[in-house]
Image (cartoon, grey):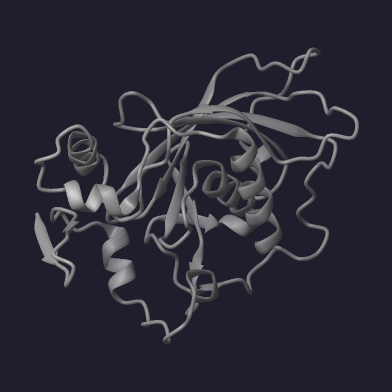
Amino acid sequence: MVAIRLASHMEVIMPRPRKSTARDRSLAQAPAPAVGTSLRQLLRRQQQAPPGELAPRDDLLLQFRIELLEIDPPVWRRIVIPDGTLEDLHFHIQGAFGWDDCHLHVFEIENQTYGPVLEDGRPVDEEMEDDEINVLVSEFLPPPTKNGKVRRKFRFRYVYDFGDEWGHELLFEGYPQRIPRRKYPLCVDGARACPPEDIGGPWRYYDLLDALNDPDHEWRDLVEALRFDPEKFDAAKATRAMRRFARDGE
């Protein structure tokens, strides 16, 4: 653990060191972004599939239950989204949970890795199968039964922030019927607040919870500055964030 003391006498706790991975080696060679460059600007978007090759089904809705791994009590969301690319799903997850989309990510699906491509053309993970903008979510999902349910459970992972390693498990729940005049994407249910960015991952999240209940905890000043309420969740607010991310990602 490394603590950086700020002028305000608060300490920001940095994640504990971990073993280098293929993702770390790939990112270590990435060009440094210019001042003011956002993460989205750093990611290259020039290898999109030719027009007409990717054809999301506009009439197809997908329902997922998404839960943060290694967190108890669970932090989870249930979302209903139109079919789209894995990049679209990334934005939906960011909005539903309340992340800031300020770190890199990958999807791990059936022993394959998918994610964004850096500005210089290299993948964020050396073992990446394909750019997420070239892959439809529906390609992986089991076919529906007559009532829109699925014959088998299908799970995969989404990892956000290679430092904190926030793992999310996605459980595909089926193909809900589209409701007339209802807009999508939609967060329909969930529980508890998303952890703050850069807190140090699941292993440091519990220190944050301890500080909430201990006025003498060394993190108390940090907790008060963050104004973090672990029980807070608002489905309508999550839906608005999902739609804002969807618009920004277009």
In the current view of this chain or complex, which residue is farthest to the front? 215
Q: Residue furthest right?
A: 180
Q: Is residue 36 above or below residue 102?
A: below
Answer above or below: position of 25 versus 175: below
* Depth order, front residue of 75/7: 7
Give the residue displayed 46% in from the left and 51% down from the top. 99
Q: Quadrant of residue 46?
A: bottom right
Q: Is residue 92 visible?
A: yes
Residue 229 shown left or right of residue 152 in the figure:
left
Q: Quadrant of residue 238?
A: top right
Q: How many marks?
A: 0
Q: Residue at x 43, y 31 (%)?
A: 192
Residue 223 % position (x, y) = 25, 47
Of residue 230 and residue 67, the one placed in the foreground of this image is: 230
Residue 125, image x and y in percent?
A: 38, 60
Relative to the observer, which residue lies in front, 6 or 49?
A: 6
Residue under the point 53% across and 31% down = 77
26 left or right, relative to 55: left
x and y, in percent, of residue 185 in the image: 71, 41
**On screen, residue 71 above or below 204:** above
Quadrant of the image containing the N terminus: bottom left
Q: Position of residue 237 (x, y in %)?
A: 61, 42
**Residue positioned 49% across, 52% down in the render:** 114
**Quadrant location of residue 80?**
top right
